[in-house]
Amino acid sequence: MKRREFITLVGGAAAWPLAARAQQPAMPVVGVLDAGSAETNQRILVPFRRGLGEVGYVEGKNVAVEYRWADGRYDRLPGLAADLVLHGAKVIAVPASTPAALAAKAATTTIPIVFGVGDDPVKLGLVANLARPGGNATGINFLTAELSAKRLGLLRELLPAAVRVAVLVNPADATRTGTVVRDVGAAASELGLQVHVFNASTTREIDAAFTNLVRERADALFVGADPFFNNRRVQLALLAARHAFPAAYAARDFVEVGGLMSYGTSLADAEHQVGVYTGRILNGAKPADLPVLQPTRFELVINLSAANALGLAVPPTLLARADEVIE
């Protein structure tokens, strides 16, 4: 064999794997947008990834995932959503945040969006209707805001002598704050309770709110559903215990870190379904044809250790209805 022919053959052989790699399609990119932080929101990724896996997608194997976290600063969400658009995301997944879902919707009218929101997605303008979303967004409505009145009733059942209830809301999410204040106010009137609203959108403001709670001598605390509060759940549970405030929360995450009681839908179930819908869209489904899902299961979780520390005797009727009692 001549030297020139040998070099040509070797060069051609070396090019074969490069050519094969060039022909392999790039992995689709899924953007995950959330109002919280990576450190405190790892919990949402477990059910989300499980949902993706059920439809055939494994991160790093046949799908790439770009994460964008606002770290509780809702004003950063529009920029983060725009960044995911620039990065060529095939789907933008918002596992559990109304402000993040609205930011994604404002950033694109073409890239599919799969959301998990506690507020009515029709009223928010995310979809045309629940059965036929009609646009580039669909997802799960886990009814957090709508359950405020029920949660207040359970708090009253636990504390029949309570008169003054403090309601903690995050003014950074004006839509949800308005819904919570309205619904809790209406329910409080029927229950004969006085409601005092306190605002907090930073860690320092949460501390200040508890100082004011002590000054106002509130009998109980109602924490509005909000991703920022969920990120600060340890701080909220510790402050409630330190100041001996019986508190009701929207998600079991608070009770698992020492909070007293929660009532709401299973966020893990919603985040799992966001993963399933994301995978289905990667497989060719259109968000306009995927109905917005709503939960049929609600969970009451009570922390007996927290109740004992507060000197509270939980009514047997309430314990009997609890889906889980943490000893």
Image (cartoon, rainbow, N blue to C red):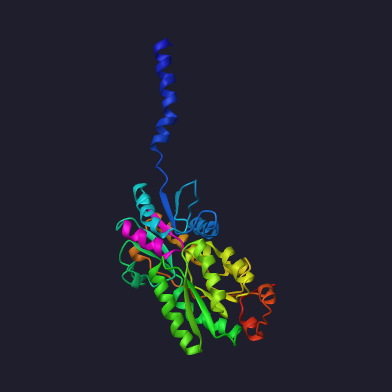
Q: Quadrant of the C terminus?
A: bottom right
Q: What is the number of callouts on the image?
A: 0
- The residue lying toward the viewer, choosing from 190 and 151, is 190
Extreme-front residue of the structure: 215
Q: Quadrant of the N terminus?
A: top left
Q: Residue at x 55, y 86 (%)?
A: 163
Q: Residue 221: within the magenta?
A: no
Q: Is residue 323 visible?
A: yes
- The residue lying toward the viewer, choosing from 78 and 61, is 78
Residue 21 position within the rendered picture, expressed as x and y whole percent measured from the top left? 42, 35
Residue 40 position within the rendered picture, expressed as x and y whole percent measured from the top left? 54, 57
- The residue lying toward the viewer, choosing from 205 and 81, is 205
Q: Residue at x 42, y 15 (%)?
A: 7
* Magenta-drawn segment: 91-107
Residue 31 position within the rendered picture, expressed as x and y whole percent measured from the top left? 42, 52
Residue 91 position within the rendered picture, expressed as x and y whole percent measured from the top left? 39, 55
Extreme-top residue of the structure: 2
Q: Residue at x 48, y 58 (%)?
A: 36
Residue 200 drawn above or below residue 246: above
Q: Is residue 283 visible?
A: no
- The residue lying toward the viewer, choosing from 199 and 152, is 199
The image quarter in which residue 127 lies = bottom left
Q: Residue 103: within the magenta?
A: yes
Q: Residue at x 67, y 76 (%)?
A: 310
Residue 299 drawn above or below residue 101: below
